[in-house]
């Protein structure tokens, strides 16, 4: 049923119990794949964390602070820390378009277009089937990616452009330095202090790229009226990385700064804006390593729990012949999936630590196995207590 005022409509679909069983059985294959992927992900993450921690510890012990104003030949091949002002002889745009020199210059193009959103509510029916109500709504938005309207549920009246009139771009200077030291590509890639270009530069860059005097509002230049956009209109925004002061930790190779390779094969190159000591730079990297480690641990646990949940899902679908029974089975399988995933994740992480750091891995493995054994022991005791003596 259509709703012209809000530009949305709702579809009602039903799915039989047999069809749901088939879908759940197919989902078991996906669940098994997710379950198997979780183990190497968790194991690899622990090795990555240990290697990174060892590399940072080695780098912290080896780094020396030097002046950026002169290259000292005796420091050849060493890990150095320095602070200085960025400089470059290159120009990314003519002076009349971009009066301020920059390390990087980015152009972002957005198109005014239709966006489809959908919300679905599902209710269980007696007999194991389901009734789903899906509401499709359409609104006009600015977006940097093109929405393919041919895939909309209702493409009529919601056609979007198929290409951008102007491509996104990012330019980087070929040569940059900090004092007497030249920056190589890996160092340049880490300098990303993006800022909006000044109003004067925005108007000049837009006039150059859009071939017309575009209307400027805020940080954007528009192809049409900023306050009355139409489908197909587009706008361009520019940002740049200024030549600011930076602090760098990298390997000195003659006058160049490049990644430093540690004894375990890891690379160290650290860049931050402003005057930052070597100690603070390494602390920030260690903190990032810890955060990434926990993010990947949680991702592996979730992947494993979802996999087990999908493998067990046919049980709750079978129980949906009576909706209440299906809900109870669904809650039970969810708890089982979470508990199993937690136990197996701990055991996998512990196994990895035994391989990389035995003194920590062994206690962790014991804890994981104990957590897994507790419900089994309780179950056996309950059975024994319920069994009458001979």
Image (cartoon, helix red, strand yellow):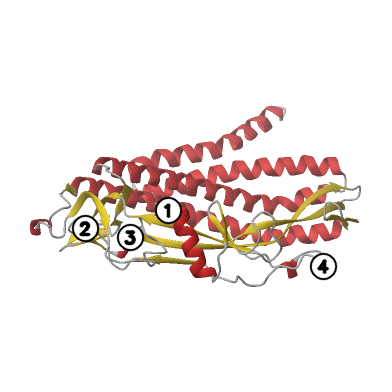
- Mark toward the viewer: 1 or 3: 1
3D distance between C-alphas at marks 1 and 2 = 25 Å
Residue 154 circle label = none
Tell me the crowding category of disc 2: few under 14, some 14 to 19, or many 20 or more residues within 10 angstroms, Cα based.
many
Query: In terms of sequence position, does the residue under pointer 3 or pointer 2 come before the other?
Result: 3
Marks 1 and 2 in Cβ contact (< 8 Å):
no
Tell me the crowding category of disc 3: few under 14, some 14 to 19, or many 20 or more residues within 10 angstroms, Cα based.
many
Residue 276 shows in this picture: yes
Of residues 126 and 91, which is closer to you in this image? 91
> Residue beneath label 2, please?
251
3D distance between C-alphas at marks 1 and 3 = 13 Å
Figure check: 388 above or below 318: above
> Residue beneath label 1, please?
194
Of residues 347 and 131, which is closer to you in this image? 131
Q: Quadrant of the N terminus?
A: bottom right
Query: In terms of sequence position, does the residue under pointer 4 or pointer 1 come before the other?
Result: 4
Q: Find numbered disc 3 in the image and state the secondary structure of the residue it sits on.
A: helix
Q: Find numbered disc 4 in the image and state the secondary structure of the residue it sits on.
A: loop
Figure check: 164 above or below 251: below
3D distance between C-alphas at marks 3 and 4 = 47 Å
Q: Find numbered disc 2 in the image and state the secondary structure of the residue it sits on.
A: strand
Give the percent coordinates (x, y) of residue 119: 77, 51
Give the percent coordinates (x, y) of residue 49: 38, 49
Please tell me in which quadrant of the rendered image residue 365 appears.
top left
Please tell me in which quadrant of the rendered image residue 216 appears.
bottom right
Of residues 151 and 132, which is closer to you in this image? 151
Tell me the crowding category of disc 4: few under 14, some 14 to 19, or many 20 or more residues within 10 angstroms, Cα based.
few
């Amino acid at each position: 049923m259509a709703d012209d005022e809000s530009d949305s409509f709702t579809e009602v679909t039903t799915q039989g119990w047999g069809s749901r069983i088939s879908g759940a059985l197919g989902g078991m294959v996906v669940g098994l794949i997710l379950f198997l992927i979780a183990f190497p992900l968790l194991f690899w993450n622990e090795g990555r964390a240990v290697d990174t921690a060892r590399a940072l510890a080695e780098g912290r012990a080896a780094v020396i602070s030097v002046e950026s104003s002169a290259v000292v030949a005796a420091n050849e091949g060493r890990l150095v820390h320095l602070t200085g002002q960025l400089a470059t002889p290159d120009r990314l745009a003519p002076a009349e378009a971009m009066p301020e020199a920059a390390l990087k210059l980015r152009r972002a193009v957005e198109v005014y277009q239709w966006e489809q959103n959908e919300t679905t509510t599902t209710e269980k029916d007696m007999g194991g089937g389901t009734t789903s109500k899906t509401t499709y709504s359409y609104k006009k938005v600015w977006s940097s990616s093109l929405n393919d309207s041919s895939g909309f549920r209702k493409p009529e009246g919601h056609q979007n452009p198929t290409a951008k009139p102007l491509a996104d771009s990012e330019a980087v200077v070929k040569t940059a330095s900090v004092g007497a030291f030249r920056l190589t590509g890996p160092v340049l890639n880490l300098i990303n202090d993006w800022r909006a270009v000044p109003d004067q530069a925005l108007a000049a860059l837009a006039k150059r790229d859009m071939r017309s005097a575009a209307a400027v509002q805020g940080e954007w230049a528009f192809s049409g009226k900023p306050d009355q956009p139409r489908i197909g209109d587009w706008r361009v925004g520019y940002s740049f990385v200024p030549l600011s002061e930076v602090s760098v930790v990298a390997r000195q190779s003659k006058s160049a700064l490049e990644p430093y390779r540690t004894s375990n094969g890891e690379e160290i190159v650290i860049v931050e804006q402003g005057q930052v000591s070597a100690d603070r730079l390494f602390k920030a990297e260690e903190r990032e390593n810890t955060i990434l480690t926990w993010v990947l641990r949680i991702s592996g646990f979730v992947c494993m729990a979802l996999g087990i949940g999908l493998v067990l899902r046919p049980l709750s679908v079978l129980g949906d012949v009576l909706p209440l029974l299906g809900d109870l089975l669904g809650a039970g399988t969810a708890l089982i999936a979470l508990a199993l995933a937690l136990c197996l994740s701990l055991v996998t992480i512990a196994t990895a630590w035994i391989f990389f750091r035995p003194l920590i891995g062994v206690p962790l493995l014991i804890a994981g196995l104990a957590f897994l054994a507790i419900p089994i022991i309780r179950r056996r005791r309950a059975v024994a207590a319920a069994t009458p003596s001979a």
